Image (cartoon, rainbow, N blue to C red):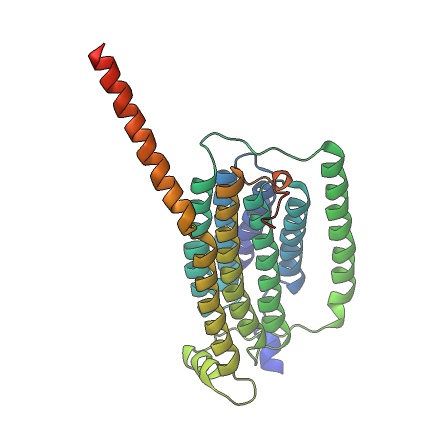
Amino acid sequence: MTDILIFILLAIVIIAFSILAVTSKHVIRSAVYLLFVLLGTAGLYLMLNYHFLFAVQVAVYAGGIMVLFIMAIFLTHQPGENVRKKTNWKIVSSSLLSISGIALCGYIIVKNINRITSFVREDEIDMQNIGMAMMGTEKYQYLLPFEVISVLLLACIVGAIMIARKDKDEEKHDHIKTRIEELEEKSENNKENKI
Amino acid sequence: MIELLVNSVSIPMVAFLIVSLIMFFAGVFGFLTRKNLIMILISVELILNAVDINFAVFNRYLFPEQMEGLFFALFGIAIAACETAVAIAIIINIYRRFGNVEVDNVNKLKG
């Protein structure tokens, strides 16, 4: 019974905040709503007894990605700036598309869900089993994808730094510009003093 | 098999699927309607998250003895993190070049 109550609470939180996240006017607010959605998803993993997935979701998504988002919003938005929306007919057409998509997929899911039997093991998976599966090279073990992911992460770090870095010329220009501005201000001040 | 039947969780599988379905289409709606690049990225995160829930749910309800869905969800989270980092680097670069991050204004390449 408590399971069902907690699930209903989590479902309401996830649905409400995911709709709010895509309709909110302020970018920073929708980032915070996204954080709530991600934490609710972590709660769902906990209900499914995937404790390791719960920990990863909280650490990577709610910890790492949200910090990235919030820093990016701080770097690219003036405070109090609202987001412009697309034209009305575009909102209407895309909401129609989403609702019809929900209707279609929901119909398919509800119609076909009874064909599959649902047996569930209550206990959680041992951390040891997860570690063995992640580090093994046999069938149903995932050392190779794990290593590929690590290379991908490295490439992504290098790529992100390369893209976000300022050009050296640009930096020089900026430096010279600020220096010139400083000199101009100084000379203006000197003139005013002399007068 | 009888043990497994007795142990079945009271929440039906369809409830999880409906939650992730609504999250997915909220993401699609945001992707189509918003003009801000960061908002588009947030919508993509919603979509990826819904897919991860589906992996975990199908694994738990259909094949509880195996861990394929769990690992797909794990690797999906890692790839989502990569994608977000690179996308945010690109967005910051766009902000530096164009002064804002609306998709309408981004209409020039460096050449």
Vertical comparison of A69 with A83: above or below: below
**Relative side of A176 to B68, left or right:** left
**Extreme residue toward the left, this view:** A194
Residue A51 is at least partly visible in this image: no
Count of numbered marks: 0
Is the N terminus of chain A in the top left, top right, bottom left or bottom right quadrant? Answer: bottom right
Residue positioned 61% across, 33% down in the render: A84
Q: Quadrant of residue A158?
A: bottom left
Q: Return the residue nearer the eye: A81 or B97.
A: B97
Which image quarter holds the C terminus of chain A?
top left
One can see residue A60 in this view:
yes
Residue B29 in the image: x percent, y percent? 68, 46
Along the viewing direction, whichever of B38 and A64 lies nearer the viewer: B38
Q: Name the spot of residue B14 as percent of width and height, x first.
A: 67, 61
Looking at this view, name the residue that lies furthest to the bottom: A138
Residue A83 placement: quadrant: top right
- Image spot of residue B47 (x, y percent): 62, 55
- Residue at image position (23%, 19%) is A190
Q: Which residue is painted at 49% across and 59% down in the image?
A: A42
Q: Examine the rendered structure and indicate whether residue A145 appears above or below residue A184.
A: below
Q: Is residue A142 left or right of residue A116?
A: left
Apparent side of residue B79 relative to residue A98 in the rendered image (left or right): left
**Residue A87 appears at what percent x and percent y?**
71, 33
Task: From the viewer's perspective, tell me whether residue A91 is left or right of residue A8.
Answer: right
Residue nearest the viewer, comparing B5 with A123: A123
Residue drawn at the location 44% of the way across and 60% of the way down: A60
Most foreground residue, A71 or A122: A71
